[in-house]
Amino acid sequence: MRYAKKDILTGKLSSYFQGAETPATKDQLSGLETLAVWAHPHIVERLEAQLEGRESKFLKSVSVTV
Protein backbone atom coordinates (compact mmCIF):
# COMPACT_ATOMS: atom_id res chain seq x y z
CA MET A 1 0.00 0.00 0.00
CA ARG A 2 1.25 3.49 -0.86
CA TYR A 3 1.10 6.33 1.65
CA ALA A 4 1.32 10.10 1.44
CA LYS A 5 4.05 11.72 3.54
CA LYS A 6 4.90 15.33 4.39
CA ASP A 7 8.27 16.05 5.98
CA ILE A 8 7.58 18.02 9.17
CA LEU A 9 10.80 20.03 8.85
CA THR A 10 10.96 20.85 5.15
CA GLY A 11 7.31 20.45 4.13
CA LYS A 12 8.38 18.33 1.13
CA LEU A 13 5.81 15.82 -0.08
CA SER A 14 6.56 12.24 -1.02
CA SER A 15 4.96 8.90 -1.72
CA TYR A 16 6.02 6.07 0.61
CA PHE A 17 5.98 2.45 -0.59
CA GLN A 18 7.81 -0.55 0.88
CA GLY A 19 10.41 1.59 2.67
CA ALA A 20 11.15 3.86 -0.28
CA GLU A 21 10.15 7.51 -0.65
CA THR A 22 9.57 9.18 -4.00
CA PRO A 23 9.06 12.95 -4.37
CA ALA A 24 5.43 13.72 -5.21
CA THR A 25 3.00 16.55 -5.78
CA LYS A 26 -0.17 17.14 -3.77
CA ASP A 27 -2.21 15.92 -6.75
CA GLN A 28 -0.19 12.69 -6.94
CA LEU A 29 -0.92 12.03 -3.26
CA SER A 30 -4.65 12.65 -3.55
CA GLY A 31 -6.61 9.70 -2.18
CA LEU A 32 -3.67 8.12 -0.36
CA GLU A 33 -3.68 7.44 3.37
CA THR A 34 -1.28 9.72 5.25
CA LEU A 35 1.69 7.92 6.78
CA ALA A 36 1.46 8.48 10.54
CA VAL A 37 2.08 6.91 13.91
CA TRP A 38 -1.17 6.49 15.80
CA ALA A 39 -1.42 6.57 19.60
CA HIS A 40 -4.28 4.79 21.38
CA PRO A 41 -6.50 7.92 21.84
CA HIS A 42 -6.13 8.76 18.15
CA ILE A 43 -7.12 5.25 17.08
CA VAL A 44 -10.20 5.31 19.32
CA GLU A 45 -11.28 8.74 18.05
CA ARG A 46 -10.78 7.69 14.43
CA LEU A 47 -12.83 4.51 14.86
CA GLU A 48 -15.60 6.36 16.72
CA ALA A 49 -15.71 9.01 14.00
CA GLN A 50 -16.04 6.36 11.32
CA LEU A 51 -18.80 4.53 13.19
CA GLU A 52 -20.65 7.83 13.79
CA GLY A 53 -20.25 8.94 10.17
CA ARG A 54 -18.26 12.06 10.99
CA GLU A 55 -14.82 13.34 10.08
CA SER A 56 -11.96 12.36 12.40
CA LYS A 57 -10.26 15.45 13.81
CA PHE A 58 -6.97 13.57 14.23
CA LEU A 59 -7.02 12.18 10.69
CA LYS A 60 -7.73 15.67 9.35
CA SER A 61 -4.86 17.14 11.42
CA VAL A 62 -2.26 14.84 9.83
CA SER A 63 -3.69 14.80 6.31
CA VAL A 64 -1.18 15.75 3.62
CA THR A 65 -3.79 16.65 1.00
CA VAL A 66 -6.07 18.97 2.99
Image (spheres, rainbow, N blue to C red):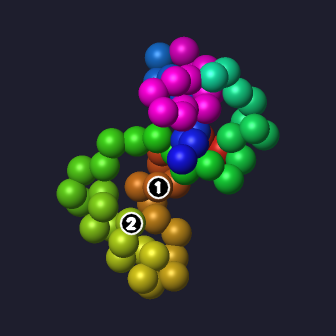
Residue 17 shown in magenta: yes
Quick one: SS at disc 2? helix
The residue beneath circle 1 is 59
Q: Which residues are magenta?
A: 10-21
x then y, percent, for residue 45: 33, 67
x then y, percent, for residue 17: 54, 34
Residue 46, labelled with which disc?
2
Identify the residue shown where x is 71% and y is 47%: 30
- Please tell me how crowded label 2 is: few (under 14), some (14-19), or many (20+) other residues with Cα within 10 Å: many
How far is mark 2 from mark 1, CA to CA? 7 Å
Q: Amino acid at mark 2?
A: Arg
Q: Is residue 8 above or below residue 56?
A: above
Q: Is residue 49 above or below residue 56?
A: below
Farthest-out residue, front: 18
x then y, percent, for residue 21: 56, 23
Identify the residue shown where x is 45% and y is 60%: 57
State if disc 1 and disc 2 touch (CB < 8 Å): yes
* Residue 47 seen from this side: yes
* 59 on left or right of 48: right
Q: In terms of depth relative to the viewer, which is nearer, 27 or 58?
A: 27
Identify the residue shown where x is 21% and y is 57%: 40
Q: Amino acid at mark 1?
A: Leu
